[in-house]
Amino acid sequence: MTRSRGKYSVRPVGSYNGVDGPRVAIAHDYLTQRGGAEKVVLSMSRAFPDAPIYTLLYDPANTYPEFAERDIRVSRFNSLAVFRKHHRAALPILPFAANAMHVDADVVLTSSSGWAHGFTTTGRKLVHCHSPARWLYLPDMYLGEDSGLLKRTVLAATSGRMRAWDRRAALSCDRYLAVSSVVQRRIADAYGISADVLFPPVAMSRDATTEPIPELLRWLSADGESDPDEAFYLCVSRLLPYKNVDAVVGAFAGRPQRLVVVGRGPDAERIAAGKTPNVLMLSDLTDGQMSWLYKNCRALLAASHEDYGLTPIEAGVWGKPSVVLRWGGFLDTVHEGITGIYFDEPEAVAIAEALDRFETSSFDPDKVRRHVDQFTEEQYAEALYAAVDDLAGWPT
């Protein structure tokens, strides 16, 4: 899938300027949140630092601050604050917004789970696909069991037209790369396109500066815990229905162990209302604080239906194992018995049973760290350079 390219800088990154190499631009659906897809865009941007980033919506306050250092080019709909804050409200008009986005480049490197693959360009389109649009092909999972009738009615009324647009957009692309094996199968089912798998990278490093979180230390101290090392389990997730964070939180009811949840999203208030005192919810943390959490947690917990599953890799950087749902991208990123254990249903009872098994298990931190060595940014960049050069017909 990826040709040997030698070192990360085998082609100087500044050479993708249309003179010494093909002119590259990056495209992404919207930069309005802090999630795994946005981390992939940052990795793309580090590989191609001169490439502008085209996106429908950009909300600097709610996405990663590193984007402020990049050349971000937005759609005209970005001027409407309601869409920046609630991008799902813009769903019916986003096909029109995507069609109106013109990217001037020889190769458009696209990070997409719904819209950016439909941006127009006279160049070639290389898509790293997080998933074909969940709201079109996995609507029940996307909306969740508690979604209202209005949401389901609107989606049902517009999905036929949007599915037709989505398939036309997919067929306008020159090459697809999938983030995981499960997404590879979805791409084949939705579009009839054969995609190679390219795992997204982990940018976190054990050399990173760690920063303790005063609120968490006070919480531990109030519970009589002075040493934070392995004093809590960790769940890092956007708070959306298909992430099943409520089930993770519910698994800690009546248990002596503690859980720290990091994330924000529309389910935050509901999850907070149902949590017990041994659960702490945090959001908007710095990179140093996230590194500190991973370094000090007992294990990562995730019950989400993930397309890829980056958080077990981030935990693995610090030698920490994971307890995750046996589904989707986690099947690629967690090696059972070596880097973590699985549970089979995203339900509190199943998660609690997995925690019991974990508490009687042991994991070798060095083996966990070695597992994540296949997910480096250097390997990811080399694969992108090879794919871009191949599409552009540029000699390597």
Image (cartoon, helix red, strand yellow):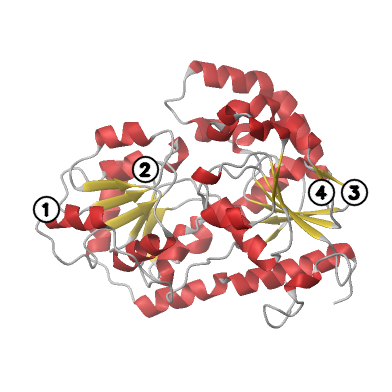
Q: Residues within 10 Å of mark 1 (few under 14, many from 20)?
A: few
Please indicate, yes or no, whether residue 336 appears anywhere in the rendered image.
no
Residue 309 is left or right of residue 125, and the answer is: left
Between circles 3 and 4, the one closer to the viewer is 3
- The amino acid at mark 4 is Cys
Tag on residue 173? 4
Instruction: Report if the CB atoms under discs 2 and 3 are less than 8 Å apart.
Output: no
Q: Which residue is mark 3?
A: 122
Q: Residues within 10 Å of mark 2 (few under 14, many from 20)?
A: many
> Between disc 2 and disc 4, whose residue precedes?
4
- The amino acid at mark 3 is Thr
Image spot of residue 375 (x, y percent): 56, 69
Q: Residues within 10 Å of mark 3 (few under 14, many from 20)?
A: few
Cα–Cα gap, marks 1 and 4: 55 Å
Tag on residue 245? 2
Tag on residue 222? 1
> Between disc 3 and disc 1, whose residue precedes?
3
Cα–Cα gap, marks 3 and 1: 61 Å
Between circles 1 and 4, the one closer to the viewer is 1
**SS type, badge 1:** helix
Cα–Cα gap, marks 2 and 3: 42 Å
* Residue drawn at the location 32% of the way across and 56% of the way down: 234
> Between disc 3 and disc 4, whose residue precedes?
3
* Quarter in which the N terminus is drawn: bottom right
Cα–Cα gap, marks 1 and 2: 24 Å
